[in-house]
Amino acid sequence: MSDLFVLSEEHQAIREAVRAVAEAKIAPFAADVDENARWPHEAAAALLAADFHAPHVPEAYGGAGADALATVLVIEEIARVDVSASLIPAVNKLGSLPLMIAGDEQLKKNYLSRLAHGEGFSYCLSEPEAGSDAANQKTRAVRSGDDWILNGVKRWISNAGESEFYTVLAVTDPDKRTKGISAFVVEKSDEGVSFGAPERKLGIKGSPTREVYLDNVRIPGDRIIGPEGTGFATAMKTLDHTRVTIAAQAVGVAQGALDYALGYVQERKQFGHKIADFQGLQFMLADMGMKIEAARQLTYAAAGRSERGDKDLTFFGAAAKAFASDTAMQVTTDAVQLLGGYGFTRDYPVERMMRDAKITQIYEGTNQVQRVVMARQLLAGVQSTL
Ligand SMILES: Cc1cc2nc3c(=O)[nH]c(=O)nc-3n(C[C@H](O)[C@H](O)[C@H](O)COP(=O)(O)OP(=O)(O)OC[C@H]3O[C@@H](n4cnc5c(N)ncnc54)[C@H](O)[C@@H]3O)c2cc1C
């Protein structure tokens, strides 16, 4: 039998293993996590026990050594039952990838092995005045002998307070614009690090989003990630890869909503028929399934490019993220519609999925920014590697 365009047996086994953990140990708590806007500690424990909390960490540092596609499958399957919990592996990859891309061996050894053992890693790029315009950084890092001293405010930091480690972008030379920005590892326990109150959000309520305050935080000189002035380039390269994981979240939540709706329409009766018999609803289901599958294929194709570091990853990462997240928003909204009034209540999971889906269109660059990225790649003549 041909294995053209099918997942390998290894990848299929990973999907099955994650799905089992997600359904048994994460799904039962998803509504409560959302309702009480609390940390999904059951999910965190289950993911750590199964080595799915940061699957991308290489085996050399004690991690599971999952490739980019396997990591996508982990995140997709968790998001299918609870998007908040899927931020655990997604944020751990986002926070630590700068280190994997540009960090020296000693730094990788120290922090990646601790991440593999369960200490979380967040990513601090955004600031109050630096959102889409990420280069407009105000956080400063100044040399003091062999050390660096950091001052500033980072905004919208996922899993802040829960994570032990933070990749922080800071200006080291204000005259050099993006080439004057460097990346550092900051620890939660470093003196001068503190956190704002959790944001009160529409969705992903189980993932705390907080400001991170850096008040004269002194860190050793060897905590810089890569050479001075390379932080912004590393941060952008990181997003090329991790946008694929946001696409995975989007595919997962869309699939979760479709799965729930498929069950519901075959149970609910109106006018003496199952509502699944109405062709108007069948067409909605068909569109939902078709769009999810297109988003999934694009996401897996992007994951392959991430693994190989192909030159068209920038286009594919942006395309997968934008397409899958737009799909997730449409599909989850349609799932609410398929449940009628019941879909609008918290007694059913689809309204949570619709609220959770929204963030995938916003973070790691809004979908407007993804289109800017894609257009630049097209105009620069970057061709598909296939
Ligand atoms: C829940 C949550 C978690 C997050 N987690 C993290 C994290 O862990 N780490 C981190 O660093 N950041 C994080 N972010 C920040 C996120 O990446 C930013 O919110 C996002 O990049 C948008 O920036 P902004 O909110 O300042 O919006 P703005 O940049 O102010 O954008 C406002 C609007 O203007 C549009 N716009 C802006 N520029 C352009 C343009 N050139 N062309 C067309 N339209 C444009 C945008 O698309 C948007 O519609 C998180 C945000 C949220 C809400």
Image (tube, rainbow, N blue to C red):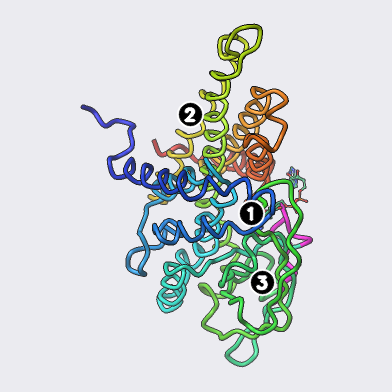
Distance from the alpha carbon under mark 2 to that under mark 3:
40 Å
User: What residue is pinned by disc 3?
Assistant: 170
> For numbered disc 1, what is the local secondary structure?
loop
Q: Earlier in the sequence, mark 2 or mark 3?
A: 3
Nearest the eye: 271 or 62: 271
Identity of the residue drawn at 38% across and 43% down = 15
- Tell whether label 1 touches label 2 (CB within 8 Å): no
Amino acid identity at mark 1: Gly
Q: Which residues are magenta?
A: 128-140
Which is nearer the N-term, disc 2 or disc 1?
A: 1
Mark 1, other Cα within 10 Å: few <14 / some 14–19 / many ≥20: many
Which is more toward the observer, 373 or 357? Answer: 357
Disc 1 target residue: 206
Q: Is residue 291 visible?
A: yes
Q: Is mark 1 within 8 Å of ligand 1?
A: no
Q: Quadrant of residue 136?
A: bottom right
Picture coordinates of residue 221, whole percent (x, y): 55, 84
x then y, percent, for residue 4: 29, 30
**Main SS category, magenta section:** loop
Q: Earlier in the sequence, mark 1 or mark 3?
A: 3
Under mark 2, the amino acid is Glu
Q: Secondary structure at mark 3?
A: strand
Does residue 264 lie above or below 229 as drawn?
Answer: above
What is the x, y in percent for residue 137? 72, 66
Disc 3 residue type?
Ala
Q: For the N terminus, give its image quadrant.
A: top left
Tag 2 secondary structure: helix
Q: Give the Cα distance between marks 2 and 1.
A: 27 Å
- Disc sitting over residue 293 in the figure: 2
State the separation of the CA atoms marked 1 and 3. 28 Å
